[in-house]
Image: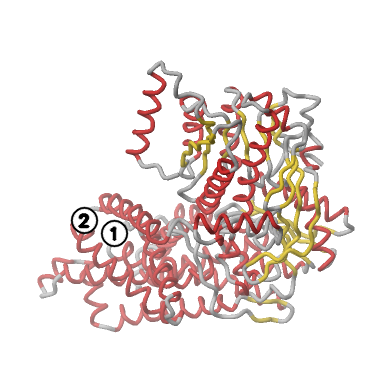
Amino acid sequence: MKLNRRKFLATTAAVAAAVAVPSISLAGDTIKLGSVLDTSGGFDAYGKPMNMALQLAVEKINADGGLLGKQVEVIGYDTQSDMALYTQYAQQLVRQDKVDVVHGGILSASREAIRQTMRKSKTLYFYNVLYEGGVCDRNIFINGVTPAQQVEALVPYAMGKSGKKVYILAADYNYGQITAEWIKKYVAENGGETVGLDFFPLDVSDFGSTIAKIQSVGPDLVIAPLVGAAHLSFFRQWAASGMKDKIALASTTMGVGNEHKVLNAAETDGIMVAYNYSQDIDSPANNAFKANWEAAFGDSNSIHEIAVSNYQGVLTWAEGVRAAGSLDRDAVIAALETGISIDGPGGKVTVDPKTHHAVLDVHLMEMENQGMRVVKTLSQRQPIDTQAVCDLAANPNDNTQYEIKF
Amino acid sequence: MDFGFVILVEILYAVASLALISAGLAVVFGMMKVINLAHGEFMMLGGYAAITSANMGVNIFIAMLIIAPIVVGLIGLIVERLVIRHLYGRLVDTMLATWGLSLFFIGCATMIFGNTTTGISTPIPGFAVGDYQINGYNFFIIIVSVVLILAMLAVLKTTRLGLIARGTMQNPDMASALGYSPDRIYMATFFVGSALSGFAGAILAPLVGLVPTSGGAFIAKAFITVIAGGPALISGLLSSSALFGFVGQVFSFVASPVIGDVAMLIAAVILLRLLPQGVTGRFFKGKL
């Protein structure tokens, strides 16, 4: 949703008027779905397709007759890749717009910025992004892939194709550090050895010395949970040094924001990844999804992992409302906790009652010609990392993001 | 042995890329005393000029070596005529004005190219040295920097144009009395300075990719190199990039790229404490 200042003022004025005038006739006509996403600024490559997917999901729900006999209306705000705006718009969504559910947040920092606001105001919150795992809060549902789900599948496959000596290059913040720990754990469990581990702040873009260092160690496989625009140059420089055909490369982040379409085929071919979604999945749900996307937005090239997560998140919520027969937060949570599933473009997605995370299909893929070719599908993987620390059935009042220790 | 060679190449590459990044600023700040905070954005524009023309089908080397410097030079010319020429001799004001310019350029690039990463592949393949693979593009950057420095030296030292430019920077009134228009000479020098920045940005673009805010990554390194170099243009540039490139890269190898950057900054602080006028304030005095 585009929002300029004039529109913003008009909307706020209208909302203020609606609140000020004691009229209840307006309330209850539609179900209000709040959305906060970065559709401009540095993270718009993630946010724009997520927002498009949200529109599609809502259109689909409305075309199927809405929920509880009502149409769903989206109240969306563009947080402009600015963490401060998340708190502001979250307050606005819960206090003024009084939405029934909020979907959104992209970076972990943005999720943590609004999670408590949602919890205090008893507004159901969905965070639909691949992330580092460990959030334990009864008010939130998360349906992105967590590191263990990915790494558990990726490491044995990649090691099987290359060898036992693994070198890890990770982004230097909580996502990269936690993911690196999981990689080390699974490398050891599969009989391998982590021969090197380097962390890079998000603005490092020159990997020349690192590439030489990797060669002096001589691993069989490099796994790279690198994040963001600057880190993209690693893949470019790796290919430019001619390393691509010498040492196998796997990543847990490459392609989440369609990075492989910014690079060229020669630079990305053969990189091994594991996600919930690939545009190349040939299933009725995905084909229908892609056709809808094309009809709405022209071409389906911009669909990516977390756009599909957002789509699946909205559908999961809708399923919960249908099952509950009510919009009441506790009723919807109870319905979702029965272990509801939907059939999304990335396969079947089931709510895990204990953690409010998702049980989902993980596809092992290899990059090929700027696409992601599905090599193998591991169906219905549990979010085992979060399950190890979080049990909302036993502790419904838990409100922590656990750091998973080994 | 092979590993030693690889390290040597990487160090030379680090020195060369520092010299490349700083060359434009050395002219604009070192010679003209304009604190150009938009230096990084000139580089960013050079990168976009190269990538856009390469995507339109121009040979990538022509795009990098010819089109990008000309485009950015012309942008610099416009900037000089509209903004900078009113501010010569007002150091702090140039800082404010060029900071505004940098924000303006980032905004323009975001509007035109979008706030996403673009890039092109490096046009030179990697090759093997013994058991090691080296990025062939690193050699290209080393060669380009050497040629660039030699060319700057030749122009400043042996041509009449270089002599006039240096004279004007030293004493514009005297140059004016001798019949040269300082206004014109400042304009031409700023054009050259911006063109050099655009050139550097274009050369580095295939290696690191580009977003509208890429310029920020270069600006600090460029200023540190130029300031630590001191008053002599070429020898200052060479000595400080050699020192910082060496320190940074050695520590990158021993520890990590982050420690490399930290080591480089510490080296700069120590250097400026010992030699407040920069390297050439003490050594190579009076040289170019």
**Side of A237 relative to B82 (left or right):** right
Chain name for mark 2: B
Residue A369 in view of the camera: yes
Q: Which residue is mark 1?
A: B34
Instruction: Please tell me whether mark 2 sits on a helix, a strand or a loop.
Output: helix
When asked about the image quadrant of residue B218, the answer is bottom left
Whether pointer 2 and pointer 1 mark residues with C-beta atoms closer than 8 Å, the reply is: yes
**Side of B156 relative to A364 (left or right):** left
Q: Which residue is mark 2?
A: B87
**Side of B180 relative to A151 (left or right):** left
Q: Quadrant of the N terminus of chain A?
A: top left
Where is residue B183 drawn, in percent x and y?
A: 16, 67
Q: Residue at x 72, y 81 (%)?
A: B130
Where is residue A336 drawn, in percent x and y?
A: 72, 33
Where is residue A122 drawn, in percent x and y?
A: 60, 23
Extreme residue toward the top, this view: A22
Q: Mark 1: which amino acid?
A: Val
Q: Mark 2: which amino acid?
A: Leu
Q: Residue at x 63, y 59 (%)?
A: A255
